[in-house]
Image: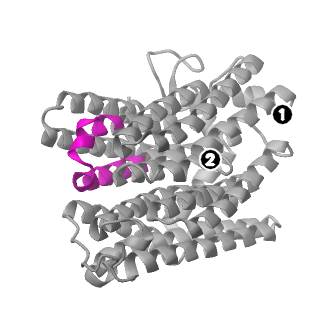
Amino acid sequence: MLLFLPLALPFATVVLTLLAWRRPALRRGLSLAGALTLLGAGGAILARVLATGPFAQQAGGWPAPYGITLVADGLSASLVALTGVTATLALVFARADVTAGEEHAGFHPLVHAMLAGVAGAFLTGDLFNMYVWFEVMLISTFGLLVIGSGSLDGAMKYVGLNLIGTVAFITGVGLLYGTTGALNMADLHARLLGRGDAPVLAAAALLVFAFAAKAALAPLHFWLPASYHTPAFTTSALFAALLTKVGVYALVRVFSLVFDTTGTPIHGLLLALALVSMALGCLGALVMPSVRRVLGFSITASIGAMVLGLAVGTPAALAATILYLGQDVLVKAALFLGAGAIAHATGSETLARSGGLWRSQPATALLFLVPALALAGMPPFSGFWPKLMLVRATLEAGSGWLAAAVLAMGLLTLVAMARVWAEAVWAPAASGAPAAPLPPAMLWPLAILAALIIVAGVWAGPLVGLADQIAGQILDPAAYIAALSGHGR
């Protein structure tokens, strides 16, 4: 049961790391091994999807649409594989970043519970089970915020809005079930085809709210910059790389497969949320006083650009969203781990109190510069291609003003990253002391992520082709629906 491995392996790792509670070295080894097995399972799922197309598997022998169905296509399989990559590199970084106290408080079991929630949300074929996996993520991430920050302030802001989003999610799911009698997404696709009556639109609006809160779309974004700067840098990197992407994935999946938003108010709502997020995210990033606060607002801007591609809705725009989504997992992980490297080397992540990294450790500084330029969309790095594709797609759709918005976002992001570079890396050290050398556990993940970002930019052709293929699967979901309904391979 290949599709159940990304769920079973993290939960098994939760149990094993709990059993190794009194043996820190064994606990770290088991945690890293669990991430590696998740990476292997994700890679195997992606290889099968690329070879044979979407496929599904049932839990407990119950047939669709009554049982619990897991389903993988190009989008979900790619994201599960990227989850494994991110988890593996982050847990290597954690060896030099996460304190013994945080590990003893449950860091490793909570991380793997979160990974199970992320993988479950990507692979589920059922809206109610997507809600369940959202809850698994919420509980585990709340625990990680509490043990990492030592303060409930950021954690309460995070959990507060996400609880409201959870209520909206389950209400929307209940409304859909009451209207259609179905929760399996293939079933819902058939039963909602051509329907735009009030209950259906109300359910769609509730789900937009829930997913927008999870993705940190403005104006539901304020919890993110208030909380992501508080825990360990490893935790922030995992959150930034994965959690908001679950929200974007849910928007793409549900509003391409379950609902047809063409010509409805939902389409205008998605477009408005995207543009507001791009604007507020960029403006917030320009004025924040610390590296992770700047990066927190940049997440909202990037998510806005991804949702813009979904709102435009053409094959080219959706392909841009998919490529943006995938490469941004690596970029955000590299940036937040890079923020940890800056804090370790200079003694602070606050822009006014750091500095000196370029003079004493130029190689380390360059490992932060690579994802920073990718975030701004500069060639030849990975972030250039999805922005270029999105600009072209909006121009082809006859919306030049949307293309201008994407270009303006790239320019403002470049200014924000230049400010971080100038104050936290290039400027003389605020303390007057040279930057402390980084341990190998910090350097290797940063180097691997930087290399992946460069490779994804320089040899972008296969990735662009894969994004086009996935966009075609989403816009023509016949194979996905056949697998999900039990009639596919």
Place residue 480 in its image quadrant.
top right
Report the magenta residues as a range.
81-110
Q: Residue at x 30, y 81 (%)?
A: 362
Asked if the magenta segment contains residue 140, the reply would be no
Mark 1 or 2, nearer chain start: 1
Which amino acid type is marked by label 2?
Gln
Please tell me whether residue 83 belongs to the stretch shown in magenta. yes
Instruction: Indicate the position of residue 155 as horizontal and vertical percent values.
Output: 47, 40
**146 displayed left or right of 156:** left
Amino acid type, residue under disc 1 in the picture? Gly
Secondary element type, mark 2:
helix
Residue 470 or 31: which is nearer the viewer? 31
State the image coordinates of residue 389 (x, y, percent, origin top left).
Answer: 64, 68
Q: CA distance from mark 1 to mark 2?
A: 20 Å
Q: Is residue 427 visible?
A: yes
Q: Residue at x 64, y 25 (%)?
A: 170
State left or right for residue 170 relative to residue 401. left
Q: Nearer the viewer, residue 250 or 389?
A: 250
Q: Residue at x 23, y 56 (%)?
A: 96
Query: Which numbered disc covers residue 194?
Result: 1
x 22%, y 30%: residue: 16
Q: Is residue 253 above or below residue 128?
A: below
Q: Is residue 44 visible?
A: no
User: Residue 317: image x %, image y %?
Assistant: 69, 59
Q: Are marks 1 and 2 in contact (CB under 8 Å)?
A: no
> Where is 120 relative to 267, above or below?
above
Dividing the image into 4 quarters, which one contains the N terminus? Answer: top left
Label 2: which residue?
Answer: 473
